[in-house]
Amino acid sequence: MERIDGRADGAGLRVGLVAARFNDLIVDRLLEGALGALRQHAVDDDDIVVVRVPGAVEVPLLAQVLADRDDIDAVVALGCVIRGSTSHYDYVCSMVASGITRVTLDASKPVIFGVLTTENLEQAFDRAGGKLGNKGAEAAAAAILTTTALRAARAHA
Ligand code: INI
């Protein structure tokens, strides 16, 4: 039996972060959480690229540009969509989710979905360093585990 798993070691990995400015009170916390997790997993600051975009809808395009770069191993998409604050919540969620899914499969590279979709601001705070943890940090850790698993799977191919 062949078993492949990721490793929580980001040394030498190059990671792109794309973060929306919309709801920046929340997204800035996700971004700080993601940066902290990358550093904790030994990713060097010189190997991190951070791109800010206006809103979640714009995240997939910049994620695609980063994912297409040969010098980037994985991308983390960060944003926050809150139902209470918009009538087009469902459109924004669907655009960012389907966009990220397409980018990760087209690029055959990890593009991790670190976009909060919540009913209200309180739920968003809970997931941005509050009582439910920091989803930005979790997304960054997922980027490392997925990239190392991907490398191991390709090495065995
Ligand atoms: N963008 C978000 O990231 N979160 C939201 O909750 C949101 N709301 O509420 O509308 C939002 N809208 C902006 C959107 O992402 C685009 O930036 C805008 O439509 C321009 O394309």
Image: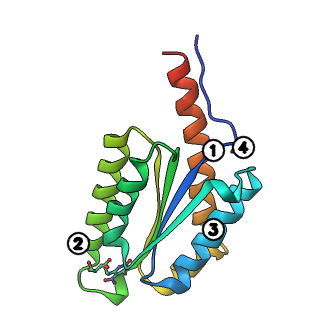
User: Which labelled disc corresponds to residue 134?
Assistant: 3
Q: Which residue is mark 1?
A: 13
Q: Residue 157, how many percent across, how many down? A: 48, 15
Can residue 127 be seen from the camera position used here? no
Based on the displayed image, in which of its 4 quarters is residue 156 positioned? top right
Q: Residues within 10 Å of mark 1 (few under 14, many from 20)?
A: many
Q: Is residue 128 above or below residue 59?
A: below
Q: CA distance from mark 1 to mark 3?
A: 21 Å
| Residue type for callout 4 | Ala
**Mark 3 or 4 closer to N-term?**
4
Q: Is mark 2 within 8 Å of ligand 1?
A: no
- From the image, state whether disc 2 or disc 4 is nearer to you: 4
Q: Is residue 50 above or below residue 7?
A: below
Q: Residue 131, how many percent across, how many down? A: 67, 74
The answer to whether marks 4 and 1 mark residues whose Cβ atoms lie closer than 8 Å is yes
Q: What residue is shown at x 59% (from left), y 48% (from top)?
A: 14
Q: Secondary structure at mark 1?
A: loop
- From the image, state whether disc 1 or disc 3 is nearer to you: 1
Q: Residue 146, how many percent across, how many down? A: 55, 40
Q: CA distance from mark 3 to mark 2?
A: 25 Å
Q: What residue is shown at x 56% (from left), y 29% (from top)?
A: 151
Q: Is mark 1 within 8 Å of ligand 1?
A: no
Q: CA distance from mark 3 to mark 4?
A: 22 Å
**Relative to 8, is 106 on the left or the right?**
left
Q: CA distance from mark 2 to mark 4?
A: 38 Å
User: Which labelled disc corresponds to residue 91?
Assistant: 2
Q: Which residue is mark 4?
A: 11
Q: Is mark 4 within 8 Å of ligand 1?
A: no
